[in-house]
Amino acid sequence: MQDDQQRRRQQRKACDLCRRRKVRCDIVVRSGQPCSVCEKSGRECRVTNARRSHRHDRSPSAAEAEADPESSGVTSASPPATQVKAPEEQTPRPGGQEQLARNGLARFFRHGIGAAAWAVFSSTQSFRIAYVGTAVSNLVHLVALHRSFRQPETSGPASGGSSSVSDAAAAAGPKPLHYPYPPIRQPKPWKPDADIWGVPAAQDLAVEVSSFPAQDVRDALVLAYFEHVHPFLPIVSMPEFFESYRSPDRPPPLLLFQAVLMAGAHACPHPLVAKDRHAVKNVLFRRASMLYHMRHETDRIHLMQAATLFTWHVGDGDTVAGGPWYWSGIALRIGLGLGTHRQSKHLPQTETSQYRRCWWSAFVCEVFSSLESGRPCAVRAEDIDQLPLSSDDITDTPGPTTLPSGTDARPDFLNRMVELAYIGLDIMAANAPSQERLIDISSINARLGLWSLQSGISSVADNDDAWTCHLRMHYNLVLLHLHRNMSAESSSQSICSTAAQAIVTSLEQLAARDEMRQCHFTAVSAVTAVGIQFASEIRVAVTSGVFLVAIHALEQLARLLRSTMTLSRYWPNAEAVHNVFEELHQEYETLVTQHLQGERVIIPETPPDWNRLLAGEPMQLNAFTTDQEWMNIANWTDLL
């Protein structure tokens, strides 16, 4: 009897890795050798006596401190009373961070705008302060849309077109620059847990950042990157990368390799990746970003490349200390320090080409992220004298003669995007709080018109390629950033409406070609701007009694919602945009239906219940665990 008990106690003995993965460990029968799991994965087999405390062993106060902050559904400006949380809200969820990114915008629209007190989000310790930016940003116009919709309308019937939502709210006084915004990060203990970074202990960090997906997945990630990301953002030398990638003795730089895998996961069709795309991206981003912050990489151009590639990831919805604006600013500042923005005749041709690719890629990301957020750009046009890209800059280093088909980058595409970015700098200068120089709006219009004619995007054809669709989408996004602040002019109203429809058409063409995976973060900015435009047109038509115009705008908004839902497969924050405008679509559609049925139309004074809409959202990270074998191959030579 005692022998049986002793044998069962020995069988329960497991190494740290097997205990963490909750798999059977055979270390007892291996007689001092590593267990088969650790031996197969190439990891050190360790057994520690200390056992980690589980979440259900902690005190109720500790569990409550880490509960999902989304459980606070305060609807008034007064400080909330003691709240009872639903049972499902008392346990932190694996996908809580992504959920915050998905519903933060909707909660801001529901509670933050127009809040009379800053305690609207639980407490002053849980909400954050949101700076809405200058008049070019989407948040400024989302706030204006909310405020004007909730205020009584005194205007007469519309004479055609739509006025900007900012006009109706102009009489309300100076526009606030800061608002309370819902929390985007779950509360954490003062001292971090051992698994705070998603790995069980700090000593496993080196293994974590040096682990890779299985060979077939890894190959699919690399191919997806060069097929769908690299052609539009050629920041990496493809011949040089493939030469290193196929070499067992000289692999690619670890930071750059992990960043390429992360960006490739954005578009990868491999079943294991597509099933849990956002979760896989989160794991790969965590590895690459930890490498970045650990200062493991000493080549600063690789730091710049990795930071630019990080713009293909959104995590918890933080757009200030994370996200595209943050990372493009870091990449641009590294480039400025390296002098990549300057033309130099003394650099070797290889370095010259690399500098140009890296600089212009980061420059485009920086300008469009600044336009979206209404925040200052990290560079001035007068600081730059770098030359445009040429074909020689794309294939700058010798490499394998055989490369994947369809992976050729076109320097003319990035050069066109750079031209748009320069125009974007002037649009931001025209909306700056303290203008140092007079900005001629007519000259900006002339440059945009000339750009449209020279780029060949002025006419829409069924056989438009992806390059044309992307250029048309970004061109019309710039038009919206410029003209939605000049709604007093009827021409600007027409330009905004036409631009919004052109963006929807471009997205539909990309979706029909199954190329929505190629869209960068700017596509989410575009659908947000278009949704604001269509909602503004519907509001003007409804409040003016022109319901046939409202029906047409509702149809346009429905088209946008379909494209936005497709986009959310690749960008989780697109789902938040979809939910905001889907609820607006339902509300306006109800108003139009009431009018057509002869009922009196009363615009509600309170927004819809956004939290009810978001309560049933599926959690895409719940079924994914980061300890799956295919994500954790430790040896580089095992990948070849």
Image: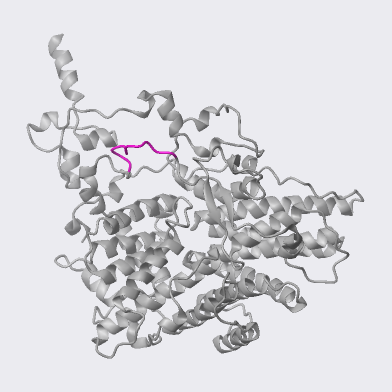
Residue at (33, 28) in percent of width and height: 54
Give 384 or 103, whichever is nearer the viewer.
Answer: 384
Give the percent coordinates (x, y) of residue 210: 23, 54
- Image quadrant occupied by the N terminus: top left
- Image quadrant occupied by the C terminus: bottom left
Give the percent coordinates (x, y) of residue 514: 52, 66
Quarter residue 123 falls in: top right
Q: Is residue 302 left or right of residue 67?
A: left
Residue at (62, 65) in percent of width and height: 529
Q: In this view, does 165 lie to the left or right of 417?
A: right
- Secondary structure mostly seen in the magenta stretch: loop
Q: Is residue 19 left or right of residue 544?
A: left
Instruction: Find the magenta span and give its range.
Output: 187-196
Give the percent coordinates (x, y) of residue 408: 38, 79
Q: Is residue 455 left or right of residue 550?
A: left
Q: Residue furthest right?
A: 598
Does 487 lie within the magenta span?
no
Res. 220 in view:
no
Give the percent coordinates (x, y) of residue 601: 86, 50
Give 614 or 133, whichever is nearer the viewer.
Answer: 133
Residue at (74, 73) in percent of width and height: 493
In the figure, 395 relative to 68: above or below? below
Res. 398 in view:
yes
In the figure, 67 relative to 104: above or below? above
In the figure, 368 relative to 601: above or below? below
Q: Which residue lies furthest to the bottom in this view?
A: 345
Does 191 lie within the magenta span?
yes
Residue at (35, 55) in percent of width and height: 285
Q: Which residue lies furthest to the left in this view?
A: 32
In the figure, 89 relative to 322: above or below? above
Quarter residue 121 falls in: top right
